[in-house]
Amino acid sequence: MVDIDHTIIGVHGHQEQGAGFGSARALMAEPRVLLLDEPSSGMSEQEIIQLRGRLAALTGRGTALVLVEHNLNVVRSVCDSVTVLNLGHRICTGRTAEVLARQDVAEAFLGTAAASQGG
């Protein structure tokens, strides 16, 4: 992601000054599909808010995102549909709100005991 002050969000979500030209080049090409692996990893809450806005802007102009992400606030804010994997196996696919409300998805993210206690 490119910011006006030339700060670029790197592959692992960390900010790098003056680096990441591959990411900038990819965005300049206006891709139809963009694969992002844990883009919010290592970010502060403020940086995550900015990231969510940038991702929403990308989807708003027609870029499809393939997002690997554990931050459910990011997932909820930018994904229309999701596929949830656990240990390499697909649990389910569907509309984001419906999938994230499922008990088996909560168990995969939180563990069986925590999910049964509501978090």
Image (tube, rainbow, N blue to C red):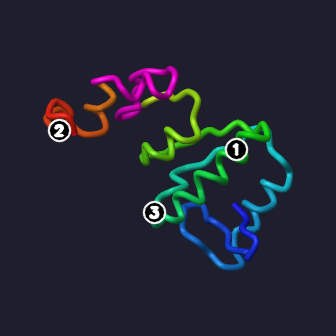
Q: Position of residue 87 (x, y in %)?
A: 35, 35
Which residues are the magenta region?
A: 85-103
Q: Position of residue 53 (x, y in %)?
A: 63, 52
Q: Decide which of 91, 72 is in the foreground and name it.
A: 72
The amino acid pointed to by label 1 is Leu
Q: Mark 2 to mark 1: distance in Å?
A: 33 Å
Residue that label 1 marks: 34
Residue that label 3 marks: 45
Horizontally, residue 26 falls left or right of residue 100, namely right
Residue that label 2 marks: 114
Residue in the image at 55% along x and 49% along y:
37
Q: Mark 2 or mark 1, which has the lower sequence index?
A: 1
Crowd rating for badge 2 (residues with CA inside 10 Å; few <14, some 14–19, many 20+): few
The amino acid pointed to by label 3 is Glu
Q: Is the residue 97 above or below the residue 10 in the image?
A: above
Q: Mark 3 or mark 1, which has the lower sequence index?
A: 1
Secondary structure beneath dot 2 equals helix
Q: Nearer the viewer, mark 3 or mark 1?
A: 3
Secondary structure beneath dot 3 equals helix
Residue in the image at 25% along x and 40% along y:
110
Quarter-wise, where is residue 80 in the image? Answer: top right
